[in-house]
Image (cartoon, grey):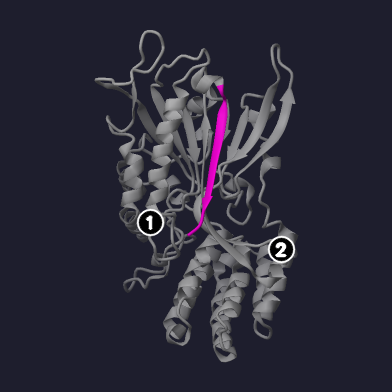
């Protein structure tokens, strides 16, 4: 049995909340049930499965959403950001420190997953000679559980070569009980023969999916480089609440500051100004304080646009996403958050940054074209979906090809689609994972997807 989950975004707690440890407890309980069901074979008999592989498909740890990137450095150490020299010792040390804090902050949740990899982590009743489970077994059959980690756009640092990054990866491997060998965690399947062969045995092709998001992946640089999305997160999403707290905390109503720290969980990311506007409306912030908030926003955004990294990404003589953001910054000097909202809607339409489905990209994957994969799996969008790609006749039955997005484990503040300019957001938590089977596992079933949504 193969399980795939992605986009869990475990953070250090400095920039928004991560999903609770209870979700991991729930997942482990559900995995035991799936293992039991998978042990019932196509002939109706019970035979306990021997192994479960769990693929963590990117953005599992989230070093990007951390205030540590904005911390003042010691004299002479220089500024460290995701887009500065990633071979500098201070860069690797920053990633290592953030990662250690994430692992510590989420140790209870991670221990639930790691516990599965221990010898007594998951077991099943023995089978009788007639193919039935022994109801009161003296001993149970252990099930080997292996965890595999691939990176996405929020944890791409673990793809970087070098001894310091290797020490960080070793800490992650030990914390989770991963089966990853030494070396950079893979971003694409062709980087790891063992994992590629494993997924091919289930007729699955999988990758994080950030390759198809120009905001979060620079094709010309590859996955060992930062992106415009990284800068937007660090310099605006992470920084703005900290600046507001430093300057205006005493002037804001209770709860407003906590809400602003949830910018990291707003979706889509370019709806950030709409979220800020919604908080101003809901909390009846006085006009004078709104103006001060606006001044903080203006300052943060102007400094963001002025970054050499952003200017280098701005393509001359071509209207691109950097230009859209810069246009929004320029008008904020004279207009309100309402004007920013209008430009955000325009930018989302213009650059398709609100695209939720990546199904059309699956049609171009070699594994789809050569029909070696029945299932093409991406993460990244946080939008769980199942999209039929093709069906073609076989000698005995039709073979179907399907695109599946693995969704997320996350706390959400999602922009409502009804009259979105009214800046209404709906909070909830989601938990999604996929299961794939081979041979006669689970009665001959090939796949299942499970997605739950809950709210406090």
**Mark 1 touches mark 2? (CB < 8 Å):** no
Rendered position, 415 above or below 210: below
Displayed quadrant of residue 194: top left
Rendered position, 366 above or below 313: above
Residue 191 appears in the rendering: yes
Q: CA distance from mark 1 to mark 2?
A: 40 Å
Residue at 52% x, 17% y: name it: 439
Displayed quadrant of residue 53: top left
Asked if the magenta segment contains residue 319, the reply would be no
Give the mark, 1 or 2, whose residue is nearer the N terminus: 1
Residue at 57% x, 91% y: name it: 288
| Image mark for residue 95 | 1
Residue 388 percent location from the top left of the image: 70, 34
Residue 165 percent location from the top left of the image: 36, 49
Q: Which residues are magenta?
A: 445-456
Crowd around label 1: few <14 · some 14–19 · many ≥20 (10 Å): many
Q: Main secondary structure of the magenta part?
A: strand
| Image mark for residue 323 | none
Instruction: Check disc 2 and report the residue beneath it.
Output: 418
Q: Nearer the viewer, residue 56 or 452?
A: 452
In terms of secondary structure, where does tag 2 sit?
A: loop
């Amino acid at each position: 049995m193969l399980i795939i989950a992605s986009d869990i975004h475990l953070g250090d707690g400095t920039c928004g909340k991560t999903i609770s440890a209870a979700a991991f407890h729930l997942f482990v309980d559900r995995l035991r049930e799936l293992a039991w069901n998978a042990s019932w074979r196509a002939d109706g008999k019970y035979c306990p499965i021997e192994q479960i592989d769990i693929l963590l498909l990117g953005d599992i740890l989230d070093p990007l959403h951390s205030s540590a990137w904005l911390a003042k450095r010691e004299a002479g150490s220089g500024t460290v950001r995701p887009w500065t020299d990633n071979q500098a010792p201070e860069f690797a040390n920053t990633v290592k420190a953030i990662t250690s804090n994430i692992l510590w902050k989420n140790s209870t949740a991670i221990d639930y997953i790691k516990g599965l990899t221990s010898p007594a982590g998951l077991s099943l009743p023995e089978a009788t000679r007639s193919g039935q489970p022994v109801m009161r077994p003296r001993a149970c059959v252990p099930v080997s559980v292996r965890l595999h980690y691939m990176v996405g756009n929020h944890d791409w640092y673990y793809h970087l070569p070098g001894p310091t990054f290797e020490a960080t990866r070793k800490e992650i491997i030990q914390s989770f009980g991963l089966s990853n060998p030494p070396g950079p965690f893979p971003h694409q399947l062709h980087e790891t023969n063992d994992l590629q062969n494993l997924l091919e045995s289930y007729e699955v092709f999988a990758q994080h999916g950030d390759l198809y998001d120009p905001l979060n992946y620079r094709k010309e640089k590859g996955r060992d480089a930062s992106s415009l999305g990284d800068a937007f997160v660090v310099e605006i999403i992470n920084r703005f609440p900290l600046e507001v707290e430093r300057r205006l905390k005493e002037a804001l109503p209770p709860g407003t500051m906590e809400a602003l720290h949830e910018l990291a969980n707003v979706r889509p990311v370019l709806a950030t100004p709409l979220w800020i506007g919604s908080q101003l409306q809901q909390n009846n912030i006085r006009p004078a304080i709104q103006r001060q908030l606006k001044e903080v926003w203006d300052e943060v955004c102007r400094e963001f646009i002025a970054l050499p990294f952003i200017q280098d990404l701005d393509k001359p003589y071509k209207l691109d996403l950097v230009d859209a953001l810069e246009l929004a910054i320029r008008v904020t000097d004279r207009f309100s958050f309402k004007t920013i909202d209008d430009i955000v809607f325009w930018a989302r339409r213009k650059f398709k940054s609100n695209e939720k489905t990546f199904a059309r990209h699956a049609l171009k994957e070699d594994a789809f074209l050569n029909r070696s994969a029945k299932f093409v799996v991406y993460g990244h969008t946080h939008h769980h979906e199942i999209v039929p790609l093709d069906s073609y006749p076989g000698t005995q039955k039709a073979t179907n090809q399907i695109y599946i997005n693995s969704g997320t484990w996350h706390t959400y503040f999602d922009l409502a689609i009804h009259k979105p300019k009214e800046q209404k957001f709906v909070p909830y938590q989601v938990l999604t994972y996929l299961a794939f089977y081979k041979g006669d596992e689970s009665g001959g079933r090939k796949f299942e997807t499970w997605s739950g949504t809950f709210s406090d």
